Amino acid sequence: MKYPVPRLLLGWLAVLVAAGLAPWYGAGPSGGLFALSISGFPPLLAVLSLVAAASFAAMAPGRGIPQIAFALGAIGVILFLPEIAGQTGGFRASEPLTSANQPPIGAGAVLTVIGLLGIIALGLMRRGLMGGESFGNHLLTFIVAVLFLFILMPLGEVFRTVLRADGELSVAASFMSRTTGSEIWSLACVSGSGRCGMAWNSIFLGAAVATSCTLLGLVAALYVTRTGLRRTGGVRLLSLLPLVTPPFVVGLALILLFGRSGTITVWAADLMGVRPSRWIYGPQGVWLAQTLGLAPLAFMVIHTVLLSVSPSVEEASSTLRASRWYTFRTVTLPLIRPGLAGAFLLSFIESMADLGNPLIIGGGFQVLATGIYFKIVGAQSDLGDAAGLGLVLLMISLMAFFAQSWFLKGASYVTVTGKGDSGRNALLPARVKFPVIVITIIWTLFIILIYGTVLVGGFAELWGRNYSPTLRHFEQAFGVTMGQYGIVWSGGAWNSFSTTLVIAGLAAPVTAALGLLTAWLIARCRFPGRVVFEFTAMLSFAMPGTVVGLAYVLAFNAPPIEMTGTAAILFFAFISRNMPVGVRVGLAQLSQIDRSLDEVSLTMGASQWMTVRRVLVPLLKPAIATAIIYAFVSAVTTLSQVIFLVSPRYDWATTYIVSLVENTNYGPAIAYSVVLIILLIAAIGLLQILLRQAVFRRRDTDAPLQPAVGEIR
Amino acid sequence: MTEDAVSFEKVIKKFGAVQALEEQNFTIAKGELVSMLGPSGCGKTTTLRLIAGLEMPTAGRIVIGGRDVSNVPTNLRSIGMVFQSYALFPHLNILENVAYGLIAKQTPKKQALVRAMAQLEQLGLAEKTYKLPAELSGGQQQRAALARALVLEPDVLLFDEPLSNLDAKLRRQVRDEIRDLQQALGLSVVYVTHDQTEALAISDRIFLMRNGRIEQSGSPRELYDAPRSEFVADFMGDANVLKVKAGADGHVRFGSIPVPGSLAPGAEAILVARPELLAIAREGQEGLPGRVARASYLGGVMEYRVETELGTLLIADRNVREPVRGGSDVHVLAAPEDLRLIPQTTLSI
C-alpha cells in the first residue's frame, strides 16, 4: 500500500515542473507559469502558490485532505477565474495582460491540470479510497475530470446562457421568453388558426414516429422469432442497414423517389395526368423518413425482449388448453410490454434528436432541433434563444429517457435465469401470422427500394431528368488525378472524408476505453458518490446531438478553453457523447463475468491494474470490439452533433453531404453517402470477425451487435 | 513471533445499517484446519472474506502471520483462496493460471513457470498443463484452483465451499485429498461450508456460526456430542430435541433411565438424543415406553417414529432384518451418557 506513493508522486511533481516551464497560454504572451507569475501577474501567482502548496502537502505526511483541497483550488482558479470565463471578443494583444484580458490556455496550463489531478488521485489513495489502490484512484479522478469538463461544464453553460439577462429584460423575463415563447409552445395548429410551436411539432412528430416504429419493430421481431420461417437472416440484415446509414440518407432517397421530380412522383403524375406535387416535403415526409430510419432500433429492443421470454411459460400456457391466440394475447404480449414501451420511448428520443431529416425534407415544418440550428447559423442568430430551445429539448428528452429506463427496468422479470430453459417459443396464431408476414415483406421491399435508389442514384447523370449512367459524381467527390507534383486529391469530398475517418478513428478507441473503464469503476469498485458518478456518465446519452453541439459552442468558444474550429472539439464531443455506449456494453459484459475472477486475482497478489489488464481485458474482448465499432459508426453518421462544431478546415462527411443536398447537388451527395455506407458495413464486418475470435462468450443466441445495441438503449 | 496463523480481535463488520458480524474474537493456530459452518447468511463467508481482505472490517484488528493487516488490501496479504466456482481464468491455460500469482509478484517468468509446473506435478495435474480450464473435469478444475493458491505458499489458505460444485462421490474423495494435503504440508486452513458432515470429516476445529456470531466452537466431537444449544444440536446432524422438566429432585428422567446432570426442581430444559444412539426394545420394562407411529425402511437402517410421553422420537436402528411394525408398543432405550441436557436459559430464541 505504501510503496507506489513516492514513485508516483515524483512522477506527478515532474509533470508539474515541466508544466511550469511550458508556455502557459495558447496564444499571446509567451512564457510558462514560473516566468509569467514572477513577472507579477496576480492570477497566475495564485495558481503557482496553490500548486506549490499542493505539492508540499503531498510530500508531507498526512491523510490527503490538504493536497486535494489545494489542487482543487488551483484547478478552480485556472478554469473559473470569473473575469475570463465566458469572456467574448477574444484576447486583445494590443492591451496589457489583465485578469479580464487573457488568451486561451495552452500546453502549460493543460499539463498543470493533469499534474494536479495526479496529486488529487494520490490524495484519494492516502484517504484509503478503494483500498488505496493507485489504478482505481487515478482512473476515478481523471474520469471525473473528463465528465466535469466535457459534460457538466458545457451543460452548465447552456443554463447560464438561458439565464443571462437579455438587454432590458430581467433574468426571469429573459428566461421565460426563451423557453416559453409562442414560437415554441403555440397550439394554434390544433384549432387551425396557424402554426404550432416547435416543441409541439417535435412531440407530435416523435409520438407518431414512435408509434409506427414500435409497431413495425414488433411485427418484424415476431416475424423473426415466432413464425417458424427459416429465412429470417435477410430481414435481420436489411433491418440493420439503416443503423449504418447517416439518418438523413433515408430522407434523401425519399426525395429522389417522391420529390417533385422524383421517379415515383413523375411516373404517377404521368399515369394520372396530374401535375407532380411536393407532398413529401413536410411533417409527413419527415415522419416517413424517420420511421424507416428508426424502426430497426425498435426492432432490436423488442427482438431482445421477445427472445428473453422463456419458452416454458408459453408452453405452460398451451398445456393449460390455451389456444395460440389466447397465449399470444395473455402471455406473450404482456411479458414484452416493457420492451414495447422502451422501444417507443427510444424511437421518440431519437426522433426528437434528429436534425437531418427535418432539415432536408421538412419544408417549412420546424422542430426543436431545426429551430436550434437556425437560431445558431441562420439569419435570426441568437445564442440565448438557441440555448432556451436546447433546454426545452433537453428536458423533454430527459423525461423520455427516465421513463424509458424505468420501463426497461420492469422488463427484467422476463429475463431467463440461464439454465434449464429449453423449449420452443409458441408460434403465432394464423390471424396474427398472416399480417405479420405481409407487413414485414412490404417493409423489406421498401428498404430495398430505398437503398436501391441510393445505390443507383449515385450513378445517374441527373436524377429525375437524365438517367444515363455516369461516374461523374464519384469523380467529383473522390477524384484523384496525377498532377505535376504527384497525386492530387482533387475530389471535393476528400477533406471532410479524411477528417471524418481520422477523428472518428482516433475518438473511437478512446471513447470505448473510457466507457468500459467507467463501467468497471461502477460495477467493481466501491467509493462514495458512485450513484452520482454513474448518472453523470450516462447523462450525455439523453442529450440530443444538437444540444451537445450547442453546449460545446457555448462553452468552448472563449477563454479559458477555446477549441472552436479545431479538431479537438470534435474529438471531445464524440468522446463525451458516445462514452455511455461503452458504459452500457461494459456493465452488461461485466455482469456476465463472475466477480470471483477479479477477487481470486487479488488474492494472488495481483494489483487492480494487473487484474484489469490480464483478466478483464481478455474476457471483455467482445465488449471492447462492440464499443469501438459503435463509437466509430455513431461518430461517422452523426449530423446534429457536429453541425455547429465543424469548420472549413475540419469539415465532417455528413455536414458536407447536407450542404450538397441543400444546394440540390444530389448526385455527389448520394455518391458520397454510398461510400460512407460501404465503409461502415466494412466496419461492422470487422466487428463480426473480431467477435468470432472471442471464444469465451457465454451464450450466442443472436447476431452479436444485437444484444449489445439492445442493452445500450 | 506468534504461533497464530490468523487472529481476530474485536472484529465487527457492518454493511450499511446491517450488522453482518457481531464482535468476533478468535485465533487459528498454525497448521490447523478450522471450518466455518452454518446456514446461509450466518456470516461465515463474510468472515472468510474479511481474512482475505475482500471486505474491510468496520472495527477491530485482523492479524495474519503476526502482521496486522486490518487495512491492507487483498493483494498485499499472504493468503490463498479457493473459490466455490474455482474462478479459474478461462482465457489462460492451467499452467498460466497457476503461474499468475507468481508473475504478479514479479517473479521472473521462467522461474514462475518452473514453480507452477512443480506444483501441478505435486497435485497430479502434470498432463493438463496446457489445457484450458473448460477442458478439465470438475475435480481437476478444483485441484488446479488449489494448486494456484498453494504455489504462493500463503500464511493461510481459504476455501469457500470448495466442494459444492462436485457430485457426491467426488466430494468425499476431494475432501479427503484436501485434508491429507493440509496435514502433509502443515497448512493453516480456513474452510467455509454449510455441510456438517464435510466439516466433521475434515476439521481440527469447527466454528458453528449463526446470525453473525460464533454459536459454538470446538472439535468435531465436542460439537456433535456436547451441543450447547438446541441450534447446535439440530445443525450437527439429526437430533431428537425434546422439551423436558426436572422433577422435584432436580433430575430429568427418560422413562426409567436417569439423565445425568441436575437442575433446579421443576426447571425446564432441552433433552438432546441422537437417533442412532437410541435403541428399540420390544420386550421388558426398561426405558421410555412408547408406540411406533411409523416405520420406514431406508436400506441400511430402519427409521422409526415413536410417540412417547416426552414427544415424538426419531430412532435409527441398524437391525433391518426384523423390523418392528407400526403400531407396536415398545420401549426406547438409551445409555445415560448419550442423553444430554441443555438448561433452558442458554437457549436463544
Image: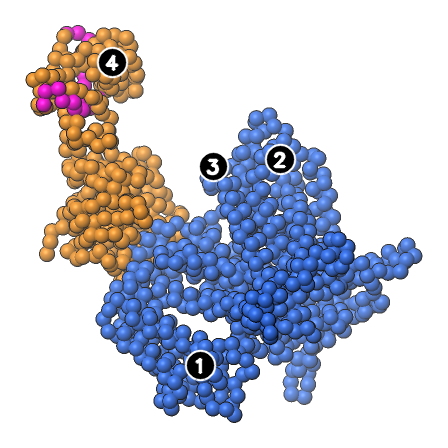
Q: Mark 1 points at which residue?
A: A107
> Residue A595, position in %: x, y?
37, 51
* Part of the protein shown in magenta: B264-284
Chain identifier for the orange-coloured part of the image: B
Mark sitting earlier along the chain (3/2): 2
Q: Are marks 4 and 2 on the same chain?
A: no
Residue linked to disc 3: A420
Q: What hue does chain A carry in this figure? A: blue
Q: Mark 2 points at which residue?
A: A328
Q: In this view, does A563 lie to the left or right of B327?
A: right
In the displayed structure, does residue B220 sit left or right of residue A395? left
Give coordinates of residue B72: x percent, y percent.
24, 59
Mark 3 → mark 2, Cα distance in angstroms: 23 Å
Location of the C terminus of chain B (image quadrant): top left
Q: How far apart are marks 4 and 2 (CA)?
A: 55 Å
Task: Measure the C-alpha gap from mark 3 to mark 4.
Answer: 43 Å
The chain carrying label 3 is A
Q: Where is residue A612 in the image (x, y as percent from the top left)?
A: 38, 60
Tell which subunit mark 1 falls on.
A
| Sequence-earlier tag: 3 or 1 | 1
Element at label 1: helix
Residues at marks 3 and 2 touching, judged by CB atoms closer than 8 Å: no
Report the front residue among A19 and A207: A207
Q: Identify which residue is drawn at 55% across, 50% down.
A: A403
Q: Which residue is under mark 4?
A: B307
**Residue A168 drawn in magenta:** no
Q: Label 2 near label 4: C-beta < 8 Å?
A: no
* Disc 3 and disc 2 on one polypeptide chain: yes
Q: Circle 2 — which element?
A: helix
Q: What residue type is labelled 1?
A: Ala
